[in-house]
Amino acid sequence: MKPSRPAEPFWLLLPMLTSLGLFFLYPLVSAFKTSFYDWDLLTAPRFVGWANYRAIFASGELLGSLGTTLAISSLVVVGSLVLGLALALAVHRPGRLAAFARSAVFSAYVVSWVAVGLLFLWIFDADAGVANRALAGLGLPSLPWLTSTRLAPVTVALIVIWKVTGYAMVVFLSGLSALPPEIAEAAALDGAGPWARLRHVTLPLLRPTAAFIATTSLIASFQLFDVVRLLTQGGPVRSTTVLVYAIYEQLFRDLRVGRASALVVVFFVVLSSLSWLKLRAFRAEEAP
Amino acid sequence: MLAAATLPSVAGGCDRDDAPAGRVVIPFWFTYGGRNRATLEKLVTRFNLGQHDVWVRAVFQGDYFEGLAKLRTALAAGAAPPLSHVVGEVVPYLAEAGVLEPLDAYPEAHQLGLLPSLDQSGSFRGGAERPLVALPFNRSTPIAYVNAALFGDREPPRSWEALGDVARELTVTGRFGFGCPIDWWYWAALVGQAGGQVVEQDGRVSLGGNAGVAAIAFWQSLVRSGVMKRPPGRDYNAWEQLSQDFLAARVAMIWSSTAFVRYLEETADFPVRALPLPHGVRGSVPTGGTHFVLLKSAPRELKLAAWRFVRFLLEAESAAFWSRETGYLPVTSAAAERLASSGFYASHPNHRVALDQLSVAEPWPWSTRLFRIQREVVQPRLEAAVLENRNPAEVLAEARAAAEERDP
């Protein structure tokens, strides 16, 4: 059938396409172009070919920040999946208490990152922080939450996990609600106990949900910036310099627009690859 | 802080809509927080109400480095204000980039009576030979603050060794004897005290040579022996953290800027005493703080109006008020004399420490690379050297190599 007004969908799409073009495509193309220039915003840009890409590789800036981002993201993905699932299973039931627990856990997700950063700055203060005071109360030694190169990335990951677990829980809850109850009932009739039903029925059926949460958490944690800016400023000794923070430093601290743009381009490629993997995983799940 | 944040609307000095008709409105980007911000806003209000031609609209832009980032972005976008202030280390870079207005031809630009150590010629080696582009206002040196209740009647530490001894004596469980941000500014002070220079007279980036190594090694020994607190965070986050530790008596003695004299005196619930930094083989302190700059890209009318405001701030009354209320140095001889003759220094000896230290103030080199060396080369490596206890000679050799790297 031939559409009577073939141009209409494009008119309807025009506002979105304009917005995407202006705020996404144009900056991306502009960053790609700028990545081949040496520019400090003040003096005239100078074409330097691939030198910015070579510089971010050679200095270890790219691999270091990418590695830190991946390490923190991995902790976030695993942590939010496990905790989100555990909480979803715990509160997937009727009743006021479960409803309250659902709201309470999800509330962290809607708090602004800046507020979260300030809150945890107070909690993880080396001397006066609640965390170390609690440890002291238990007779345990205090921990260098934000001042150790080993512990600081873990602390940042813990904060992100705390923030995004509510979202993971809600998505798992929707996944649990969508499961056909007759499958679990059939398994129960066949003699499967609660643990066996969870392991062999519920969890396999939740795989698409888990994949969705994993990829969205991964992408979200790749965009981590606010908490790092507030809590550690990328330190100590670059141990929490994630990719977005490295871009910020190159641009606003070091006045290197070209290198910042090169990092942006690499960041775009990495995120696109992750999105492609996500799509591929979903299509594999949907395939008969 | 909250009071400072709400002051602009109360004072009526910072809102474009408040400007009476017929005035030239000049946006002024500033980067002072807390008490210093409130003091500046009082001066802005005083200026705005004291004449009928110009209206200064003061806009807070975060800390020094955040403000600088915004200023550069605004310059690139063609939206820079006519007046702002920038850290000393970046002045040569901005001047050579051609974005700063030469001030030599402005009325009485060379008759402002600035203290020689703080004006462009005294702040920078080679600054006198360049066109005048920067005027000092909030200038400082690092000084030591001690919790006088804990410090007692001890002699101020005059040497690095004495500093270590006092730090050890003041250290108890739950309290460090000494605290210092692992920051370029304090390291530069130590390098000078150890007899070195960050950039040699011939422009070579030596990073102090052996003096640079000794400076890092000194910090490492204090941290390793558990008497020095290295505050977490970077840049001014670390400074602020250290102030809070000092105020909470978690650190008995800190190095910080003279800019915080008034704030620490009024906030601490113990007596605060300011002391000069110790000597190594010689006395040496860098100067810090910022310089006023007019941005070349602004319309001439706005630059002239901004110049009037700068002149007002450099009048003896304004400069003395600023110094008295904050702790920053009085930048003109007249302001310093006014404070001395009024008996202010006699009753507030902490304010005098930085002024006396100017006798050993070290000028910065006029180098366009200085800012990059500070931010990219030295600062990150200092943190790594102290925290990871790396060999200082290796760290600085690596830093020197990085400093010599040219852009592609």
Image (tube, rainbow, N blue to C red):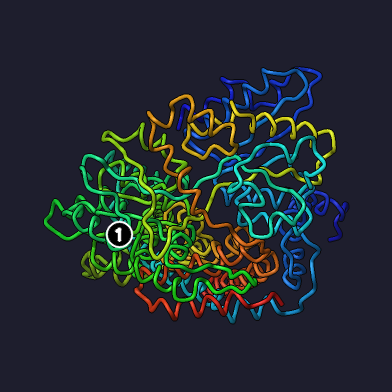
Whether residue A45 is situated above or below residue B123 in the rendered picture: below
Quadrant position of the N terminus of chain A in the picture: bottom right
Q: Residue B84: where, in percent of width, then height?
A: 67, 42
- Residue positioned 41% across, 56% down in the render: B233
Closest to the observer: B126 or B13? B126
For label 1, the crowd category at 10 Å Cα-Cα, with few meaning under 14, some 14 to 19 and many 20 or more, is few
In screen coordinates, is B139 left or right of B191? right
In screen coordinates, is B68 left or right of B336? right
**Amino acid under label 1?**
Ala
Whether residue A107 is situated above or below residue B361 in the rendered picture: above
Q: Does the rendering let one see residue A111? A: no
Q: Residue A288: where, in percent of width, then height?
A: 53, 76
- Label 1 residue SS: helix
Q: Residue B383: where, in percent of width, then height?
A: 42, 66
Residue at which label 1 appears: A86
Q: Does the rendering let one see residue B45? A: yes
Closest to the observer: B62 or A64? B62
Closest to the observer: B74 or A243? B74
In screen coordinates, is B180 left or right of B8? left
- Residue positioned 79% across, 37% down in the render: B303
In the picture, residue A36 is in which quadrant? bottom right
